[in-house]
Image (cartoon, rainbow, N blue to C red):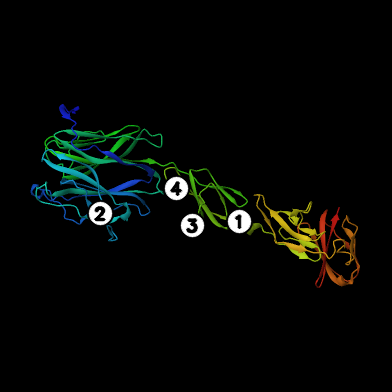
Amino acid sequence: MRIPFLIFGLIFYLHVWGQSLNVLYNVEKCGLSYKQSSILLTNRKLSQGFSGTNQPALLQISNIPQNANIEKAYIWWDLAGKDTTQTIFVKNPNNLTQTFQANLIGHGNLQCSGSKGAAFRADITEIIEGNGSYFISGLPSDSSLDFNNFSDVNGATLMIIYSDNMADFVGKIIIKDGYLTSSEDTVIEVISGINYINEADTAIGTAFMLTSELENKQGNSIQMNGGAFIVYPQNFWDFEEKLTIFPSSSTADFGLRSPFDCGQMILVGIYFQQEGQPLYPEIIGIDGDYLSANLAPSFQWFLNGSAITNASFQNLLAAQSGNYFVKETTNYGCSFYSDTIQFTICTDRLKPNINFIAPDSLWTDSLNFDLQWFVDGNPISGETLPFIIAKSSGNYWVQTEDNTGCSVNSDIVSVFFVSENENPREGNKIKLYPSPNKGKFVLKIENEKFVPGRIEIFNYLGKSVFGSQIGEETSKISMDFPEGIYFLNISSGDNHETCKFVIK
């Protein structure tokens, strides 16, 4: 079937002797870009001024960012002559050589010479090291024109596609490859699927094309992204690029014209960048030991500079104290980092100390948090001050809680009375009266083991507000302190006793 095209007043026809091109790669990703290196390898065209390179042949790659991730790497080549599947040897910059099996991506008859032609591609991603010198070998090379028995490679192109998740742009690449032959006709290939992640109407980018066997003959020209047909340098194996504008939701047309010759379109592609949609990660909430980040498509939490395993959610339960930050990533893979915060988990910042003086006095110095005393796992009603007088045997502890809802228990102290019916204070015979009082009271000690001794009075925050030596069984004490609950501790050697009183 021939479809007429009227261009510059001349009639051309679309005539496809080989296969059309198929989509190989269509990716939109953060910092996506590519580098390529092409080389002429033909041996049979030396007499016509085409100087091919002997194998191993060098393909040099440079300017890939140091922190880039290698996404894909391909080598393309085509042959005149037999179209059997080929292997290729690749040596990377670290001198590692590996064999790769080729994929036949298209073949056909070269109408101008009567010989056969075929194009191949190999995926060599696993050997790519980024920038450096790559060498290819193993491709057929022959100076004769005996295409029934031999083949001669035309050239080879290495393309490395990479991404950088720290970039401030999103790159899009679409590649189609195959074997589309032009002989006395014009062939057209179309790339569709051009769309944008933002509201821009157009994007500036690059259109590129790989052609084979195109010689410097009258009328030979190529078209990229719907522009005019232009005569590019024709060196029998050509990778051409053009800076161009891509309208949103449109297509990019590529053409090859060789009215008096043969030529193959091996590959066409487009590449453009769009401004990324930035994120501004913040650690916006602390609830107990939970850290929360602002909303994003995906998360990764870090502790002391290292990623935390399985910490990929908006909220994180911190397991230890340290320096925390969160990485948030867009749907296209661009990553952004929050500021680092120094965070102390509940146990490290809240765990209260607990002190005990037999037989029944307990207190804590953790005064900057809300307090609650427990016995045998149950909260003791009304006991929310730093001091407590145990009324029964049991396991006691105190719990602290801050304004984030973080609560931590002290160690456990076991209080044991010989008899639950026995008043543990009865033998001490220490009395403080009256209580409540107005700051004047009498302390009567009927147990000689506390005389002589020392008394110390604490307010409900645990701060010492009064201290004095005692040498008599009865002492009158006068205090000028605010109303509240106070604790009096009597000590003499290893003997201690605590009682509570109220100034009102």
Q: Residue at x 36, y 54 (%)?
A: 66
Q: Secondary structure at mark 1?
A: loop
Report, in whole angstroms, how far the alpha carbon at label 1 lies from the one at label 3.
18 Å
Tell me where residue 504 appears, x and y as whole percent.
86, 52
Q: Secondary structure at mark 3?
A: strand
The answer to whether 186 is drawn above or below residue 492 in the figure is above
In this view of the protein, which residue sits in the foreground, 109 or 360?
109
Disc 1 residue type (three-letter): Ile
Q: Secondary structure at mark 4?
A: strand
In this view of the protein, which residue sits in the foreground, 47 or 339?
47
Disc 2 residue type (three-letter): Gln
User: Which badge, 3 or 4, comes first in the chain's sequence?
Assistant: 3
Disc 4 residue type (three-letter): Ser
Tell me where residue 400 appears, x and y as whole percent.
70, 55
Report, in whole angstroms, how far the alpha carbon at label 1 lies from the one at label 4.
27 Å
- Circle 1 residue: 345
Q: Is residue 385 left or right of residue 42?
A: right
Report, in whole angstroms, how far the alpha carbon at label 3 lies from the one at label 4.
16 Å
- Circle 2 residue: 60
Disc 3 residue type (three-letter): Ser
